[in-house]
Structures are given as structure tokens and as C-alpha cells.
Amino acid sequence: MNTILAALTNPNNTKMKKLFVFGAAIALMATFASCKKDYTCTCSSVTKDATGDVISSGSASGTVNDTKKKAEEKCEEGNASFDAGGGYTTTTTCKID
């Protein structure tokens, strides 16, 4: 480590400095690269009556294999709310765990 520090602080060693900066840039790009991974999408549904009381609820999970941003977008496509008639409403909310 001391050898690297000495090489980087030596004003005559611009080649080593350029190599270090290039290596650091490659490492930074690799860190932020978009990689597909498995993400768990969990959807929860709640049905309420006309007074707002919960009459049923449940949840389900599934796997989405994509980049995190795209997995979140795909998962959130499950978000929905609808009027089931007679004052009953069902709301489904989905998110990546």
C-alpha cells in the first residue's frame, strides 16, 4: 500500500496516476452496472365494506428477474383499486421486498 501511495504522490509518475484513475473508473462503473437479479414482488389486497371495515385481506408473492428498476416497474403494475359494488372496494398494493 505504501508503494502505491508513494507512486501516486510522486509528481514525476503521471503514468501511474493515469492507470490508477482508469482502474478506479472501471471499478466504479462495474459497481453501478445494471445486472438482472431475482427480486420478490409481494402484493397485498384488502377488501373493505361501505363503512371502511376490512372484510378480507391477503397477500401473494412472486419472483421477477430483471434490473431493480424494471423489476419495481413490473411489480407495481399489479397495483389496482376497484369498486366491487354494494359499497365494497378492493385495493391491491404491490412492492419489491
Image (cartoon, rainbow, N blue to C red):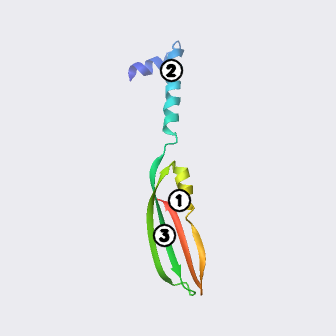
Quarter assignment of residue 91: bottom right
Residue at 48% over, 69% down? 44
Q: Nearer the viewer, residue 15 or 31?
A: 31
Which sits earlier in the primary sequence, circle 2 or circle 1?
2
Foreground mark, 2 or 1, reads: 1
What residue is shown at x 48% (from left), y 20% (from top)? Answer: 8
CA gap between label 2 and label 1 equals 42 Å
Image quadrant holding the N terminus, namely top left
Percent coordinates x, y for residue 97 in the rendering: 45, 59
Q: Give, as a three-letter code, the residue at label 3.
A: Ser
Query: In terms of image quadrants, where is residue 88?
Result: bottom right
Judging by the rendered image, the residue that carries numbered circle 1 is 75
Mark 1 or mark 3, earlier in chain:
3
Of badges 2 and 3, nearer the viewer stands 3
- The residue indicated by pointer 2 is 19
From mark 2 to mark 3, how far is it between C-alphas?
A: 51 Å
User: Is 14 situated above or below 49?
Assistant: above
